[in-house]
Amino acid sequence: ALTLTGKIIDNKNGIIKGNIKKINADKLINDEGQLLSNEKIEGIIKETSNIRGEISGNEGIKLIGEKLNNLTGVIRSKGKIDLDIKDTINRQGFILSDGITKEEGEKWQVQEKVSEKKDNKKEEAKEQTTGIVLKGERLDNVKGIIASLGQTTLNIGGLSNKEGK
């Protein structure tokens, strides 16, 4: 497994591919770059720039930080995506979990699920293992697409979602 650690990790126009497990940095620059992991990526990154870039963690992605700029970028996983970012920009970008492709995301139809209560059964609070969890103060998803087959949970202070899905 590969751990990337540094003050600034610059992968602009580059490709980092392999069993990337952990990323610890003040700044990750992945503009027009590809960060591709066969495993779950867990990153504590103060500021991530993924403009026209791709971040892919097959088993899942968990990012914690202050700022994420995913302008026209793609963040995708076959598993769960968990973003705990103060300020996320996903303008014309894609955040796709559960193996959804960019092409499928472009055709995405928003569906609301109504949970059914079953009598005489207490539902246990289980940790979400699929879908997307976004936490933060601000999410700009103008013309952006956030899609999952599982539950999508937003815990956001301010949301801009004009023409977003």
Image (cartoon, rainbow, N blue to C red):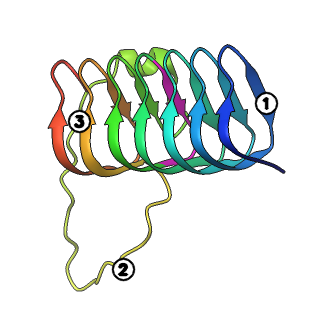
Give the answer, above or below, for where 87 lies relative to 100: below
Q: Going by the image, does 7 lie left or right of 86?
A: right
> Would residue 78 be visible to someone looking at this image?
no
Identify the mark nearer the N-term, 2 or 1.
Answer: 1
Mark 2: amino acid = Glu
Identify the mark nearer the N-term, 2 or 3.
Answer: 3
Residue 84 is situated, as x and y percent measured from the top left of the image, at 40, 53
Answer whether residue 68 is magenta in the image. Answer: no
Q: CA distance from mark 2 to mark 3?
A: 24 Å
Residue 28 is situated, as x and y percent measured from the top left of the image, at 59, 35
- Number of the label disc, if any, that sits on residue 111: 3
Mark 1: amino acid = Lys
Residue extending furthest toward the front:
7
Which numbered mark, 3 or 1, is in the foreground of this view?
A: 1
x 17%, y 38%: residue: 159
> Would residue 145 be visible to someone looking at this image?
yes
In the image, the segment drawn in magenta is: 73-81
The residue where tag 1 is placed is: 17
Mark 3: amino acid = Gln
Crowdedness near tag 3: few (<14), some (14–19) or many (≥20) residues, C-alpha within 10 Å = few
Q: Label 1's element?
A: strand
Q: Label 2's element?
A: loop
Give the answer, above or below, for where 103 lies relative to 160: above
- Number of the label disc, if any, that sits on residue 124: 2
Q: CA distance from mark 3 to mark 1?
A: 34 Å
Q: Going by the image, does 92 lie left or right of 164?
A: right
Residue 62 is situated, as x and y percent measured from the top left of the image, at 53, 51
- Number of the label disc, if any, that sits on residue 90: none
Q: Going by the image, does 55 lie left or right of 22?
A: left
Answer whether residue 76 is magenta in the image. Answer: yes
